[in-house]
Image: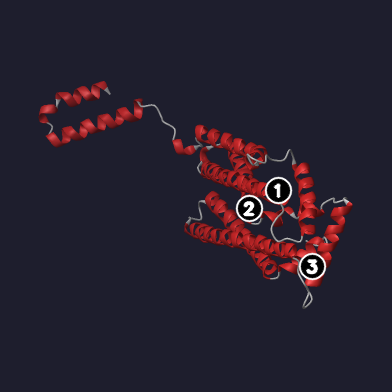
């Protein structure tokens, strides 16, 4: 290269200015290709720092989801409950007292339990929603890395795909958790009802539940009187199902929108890009299937909300 440059320099007086500029540019290009170190593309893999941050954040949120809600739900003045067993015992005792009072308003003991359960579900819904956002971001990162992993080995690609599938499943679980806890926060009294019937052995509670069943059966007939406490139970049970119907409808709309976007991108992707088409197609099928499932949930809850008394009776009879 030195001799070539010297020869060019020796003939510089005879070379036109435009040609001399072209030769100089060629020299610089040769230098870049021959002496510059190769730089790997940052998009070829996943950012280790971003991945580690999201994984750590997800782990912290999972731990918080399990540990934090009872503490966050505790009332500063009345305190909380040591565990679910103490909460269940307090609920059953308060429910018997409430039913026998004949009043529409909650007794102090039942109001304390319901307020605690409301705060408990709000805490869980917020933590699960944040976790859902983190898992979505982590899933996007992993699937993008998988699509760009053409130059990596089969083992690395399989690891990225496996991690993406796992995070996707966790995101779906988190979405379900958000939906259930929003429903529980909207109608906390109705969401407490399963604690009354599961493993109930107390004689006073068994007698109270038998009276509830009888009153519910009588309310099905024309002219049947409905006690105030039972009216509250039926109303909250209807609200419980309305909440899930609304939440499921919103999720269904989002999933349908995702399906449209995914299938449009699938159709516009070249057939030679098989990896991208497989990922888009898989997520397209998943979103369509989930949207159909959520629509069924919305319809079922709408039906129960429209006529809540028979559904509540079926629940107390063990059919819910």
Q: Position of residue 58 (x, y in %)?
A: 59, 38
Q: In this view, does 8 lie to the left or right of 277?
A: left
Quarter that holds the C terminus = bottom right
Q: Nearer the viewer, residue 237 or 258?
A: 237
Q: Spatial distance from mark 2 to mark 1, Cα to Cα?
A: 13 Å
Q: Position of residue 53 (x, y in %)?
A: 53, 34
Q: Spatial distance from mark 3 to mark 2, Cα to Cα?
A: 25 Å
The residue where tag 1 is placed is 113
Quarter that holds the N terminus = top left
Q: Mark 2: give few (<14), some (14-19) or many (20+) Cα within 10 Å.
A: many
Query: Secondary structure under badge 2?
Result: helix
Numbered mark located on residue 216 in the image: 3
Query: Secondary structure under badge 1?
Result: helix
Q: Position of residue 69 (x, y in %)?
A: 65, 41
The residue where tag 2 is placed is 185
- Residue ID at (85%, 51%): 200
Q: Where is residue 35 in the image (x, y as percent from the top left)?
A: 35, 25
Query: Secondary structure under badge 3?
Result: helix
The answer to whether residue 155 is above or below residue 36 is: below
Judged from this view, the residue extending furthest toward the left is: 13
Q: Which of 20 and 132 is in front in this view?
A: 132
Q: Counting residues from the N terminus, which is met first, the one under dot 3 or under dot 2?
A: 2
- Report the label total: 3
């Amino acid at each position: 290269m030195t001799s070539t440059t010297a020869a060019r320099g020796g003939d510089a007086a005879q070379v036109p200015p435009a040609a001399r500029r072209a030769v100089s540019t060629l020299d610089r290009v040769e230098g870049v290709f021959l002496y510059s170190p190769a730089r790997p593309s940052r998009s070829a893999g996943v950012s280790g720092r971003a991945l580690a941050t999201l994984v750590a954040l997800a782990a912290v949120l999972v731990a918080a989801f399990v540990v934090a809600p009872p503490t966050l739900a505790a009332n500063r003045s009345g305190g909380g409950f040591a565990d679910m067993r103490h909460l269940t015992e307090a609920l059953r005792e308060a429910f018997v007292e409430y039913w026998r009072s004949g009043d529409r308003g909650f007794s102090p003991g039942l109001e304390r339990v319901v307020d605690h359960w409301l705060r408990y579900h709000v805490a869980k819904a917020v933590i699960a929603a944040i976790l859902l956002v983190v898992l979505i971001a982590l899933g996007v990162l992993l699937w993008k890395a998988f699509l760009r992993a053409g130059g990596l080995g089969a083992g690395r690609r399989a690891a990225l795909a496996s991690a993406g599938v796992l995070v996707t499943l966790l995101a779906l679980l988190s979405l379900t958790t958000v939906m259930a806890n929003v429903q529980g926060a909207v109608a906390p009294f109705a969401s407490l009802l399963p604690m009354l019937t599961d493993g109930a052995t107390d004689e006073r509670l068994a007698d109270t539940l038998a009276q509830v069943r009888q009153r519910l059966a009588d309310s099905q007939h024309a002219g049947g009187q409905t006690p105030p406490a039972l009216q509250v139970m039926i109303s909250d049970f209807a609200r419980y199902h309305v909440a899930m119907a609304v939440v499921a409808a919103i999720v269904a709309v989002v999933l349908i929108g995702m399906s449209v976007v995914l299938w449009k991108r699938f159709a516009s992707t070249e057939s030679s890009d098989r990896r991208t088409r497989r990922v888009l197609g898989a997520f397209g099928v998943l979103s369509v299937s989930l949207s159909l499932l959520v629509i069924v949930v919305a319809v079922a809850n709408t039906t129960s909300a429209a006529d809540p008394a028979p559904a509540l009776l079926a629940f107390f009879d063990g059919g819910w």
